[in-house]
Amino acid sequence: MDFYYLPGSAPCRAVQMTAAAVGVELNLKLTNLMAGEHMKPEFLKLNPQHTIPTLVDETGFVLWESRAIQIYLVERYCKDASIAERLYPSDPRRRAIVHQRLFFDVAVLYQRFAEYYYPQIFGKKLPGDADRLRSMEQGLGFLDAFLEGERYVAGGDDLTIADLSILASIATYEVAGYDLCQYVNVYRWYEHVKTVAPAADKNAEGARVFGLYFNKK
């Protein structure tokens, strides 16, 4: 299946780790946003929202938004029922917590990272920088609270797709130079999960690519 992506993108890396977890091979289609490749007519035909990651499976089904892709990969392609159950549990309450953590990542954790750091990457000075920093740190504080006494972000004894999504986000915080040590639970979780997550090396490598933007400032 074709996977339109950039290696530095945290959402793209979350999908790559999920694909590795379920045993799916992705046909990588590097999509250079800076060159406007996502605005080409052939890409807009696939995804009118012109975002990455975008997945096109072997049937021609097209899907974007990384967390939706993660769920789809597990539900459609994971052949081992025990692995699928761990990654995306069927129990309604366990699954609801996984959903909450995924939505928290997209709406709070990574969104607030972007609001604080992206203007710096692109050389834009915006008012309210201190407020954005406080907002970002509040998001990290929420994650730290979720992880109190827990091994994984959705609780329980198993790594889920929520861990993979948030791992990609937190790796991006790290390469941005943010000190995670003050969030004891986040740091403990991060040090553990990056050693057990499938394709964690690809996540780390992609995060380093993203980190190059900060070296250009």
Image (tube, grey):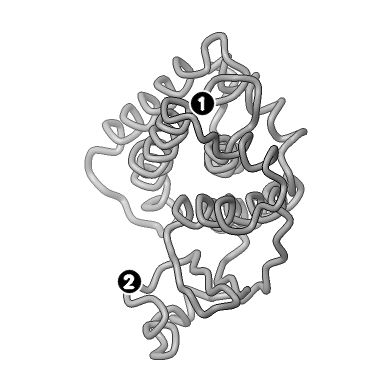
Distance between the Cα atoms at labels 2 and 1?
30 Å
The local crowd at label 2, few if under 14, some if 14 to 19, many if 20 or more residues have their Cα within 10 Å, is few
Q: Residue 57 falls in which quadrant of the image?
A: bottom right
Q: Residue at x 57, y 27 (%)?
A: 179
Question: Where does residue 49 sit, x and y in percent of width and height?
Answer: 33, 71
As rendered, which of 165 and 8 lies closer to the eye?
A: 165
Image side of residue 142 versus residue 193, left or right: left
Image side of residue 69 versus residue 96, left or right: right
Element class at badge 2? loop
As rendered, which of 188 and 74 lies closer to the eye?
A: 74
Please, is residue 52 above or below residue 144 in the view? below
Q: Which mark is residue 49?
A: 2
Please, is residue 39 above or below residue 76 in the view? below
The local crowd at label 1, few if under 14, some if 14 to 19, many if 20 or more residues have their Cα within 10 Å, is many
Q: Residue at x 51, y 35 (%)?
A: 90
Read off the residue under disc 1.
154
Question: Where does residue 4 sit, x and y in percent of width and height?
Answer: 55, 72
Query: Could you tell me the amino acid type at mark 2?
Result: Gln
The answer to whether residue 217 shows anywhere in this view is: no
Q: How many marks?
A: 2
The answer to whether residue 186 shows anywhere in this view is: yes
Image side of residue 107 versus residue 199, left or right: left
**Which residue of the protein is positioned furthest toward the left in this rendering?**
127
As rendered, which of 116 and 2 lies closer to the eye?
A: 2
Quarter of the picture holding the N terminus: bottom right
**Which residue of the protein is positioned furthest toward the top in this rendering?**
149
Question: Where does residue 72 sit, x and y in percent of width and height?
Answer: 51, 56
**Which residue of the protein is positioned furthest toward the bottom in this rendering?**
41
Q: Earlier in the sequence, mark 2 or mark 1?
A: 2
Q: Residue 165 falls in which quadrant of the image?
A: top right
Please, is residue 39 above or below residue 54 in the view? below
Image side of residue 138 versus residue 149, left or right: left
